[in-house]
Image (cartoon, grey):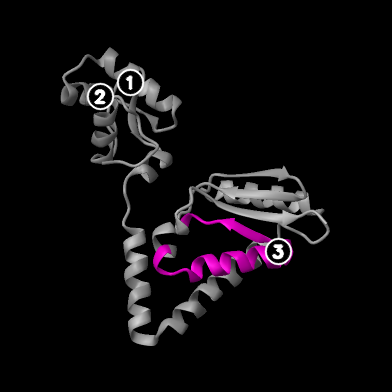
Amino acid sequence: MMQTPVDDNPIRQKILLLLKKSDGMTVEALSGHLDITPMGVRQHLASLERKDLVMHNAVRQGVGRPGFIYMLSDRAERSFPKSYEKLALDILQGIETREGRDRVDELFNWRKEKILARKKDVISNGRPLSEKIRVMSELLEAEGYIADMSEDGQSYVLRQYNCPISAISKDYPEACKYELEMYKELLGQGIERTHCISNGSNMCEYRFPKA
């Protein structure tokens, strides 16, 4: 089964699966596999294109107007399940078994420093705190997080509603530890994490005092 984003229409689900198994298909080929008319296929493809799940390229097919080959978009490709989390967990468990938990801690610290160096180029010290947090929220969105920024009383609030490494951080809280350290180095030592997905919350919430 696919992960989001998906289309809940069963015919369009079949189209996505057929395209996943191929290097691209024409309307006519899809029509034959699905046993529906080419017109019906085009309507479903148009819906999938509007959702940025399908794209097409023009191809020459002899004399006359070019035909079109339909294929999955990058967004649709990312919606299919991947086993990256299991691979990462297997690697971390192997490191822990062979070299100890301290070595795992060092690895997460190294990851923090790498991310920190990259983000420091964008979040300069000359910005006001509210602007830094806004930029951080935008960076998180660009990396696949669902994030937003708001104000609450004496604090700015940054919320992350998903965590790409939540399955890892449940076994290795070092991931959360160094994320908080990264925020402190970028945005100030007064930051407090009040909710965490790894602890069962529906979001990670960070509060930044205004003064």
The residues bearing labels 3 and 1 have C-alpha atoms spaced at a distance of 46 Å
Magenta portion: prevailing SS class:
helix
Pinpoint residue 21: horizontal percent, then vertical percent: 23, 41
Residue pointed to by mark 1 = 44
Magenta stretch encompasses residue 179 = yes
Which numbered disc flags the more N-terminal residue, 2 or 3?
2
> Mark on residue 182?
none
Numbered disc 1: secondary structure? helix
Which numbered disc flags the more N-terminal residue, 1 or 2?
2
Q: Residues within 10 Å of mark 1 (few under 14, many from 20)?
A: some
Which residue range is magenta in the image?
170-197
Q: Residues within 10 Å of mark 3 (few under 14, many from 20)?
A: many
Q: Is residue 168 above or below residue 77?
A: below
54 horizontally vs 36: left or right: right
The residues bearing labels 2 and 3 have C-alpha atoms spaced at a distance of 48 Å
91 horizontally vs 32: left or right: right
The nearer-to-camera label among 3 and 1 is 3
Residue pointed to by mark 3 = 186
The type of residue carrying mark 3 is: Leu
Which residue is nearer to you in this view: 140 or 53?
140
The type of residue carrying mark 1 is: His
Which numbered disc flags the more N-terminal residue, 3 or 1?
1
Q: Is residue 191 above or below residue 101?
A: above
Quadrant showing the N terminus: top left
Numbered disc 2: secondary structure? helix
- Residue located 55% across and 69% down the image: 177
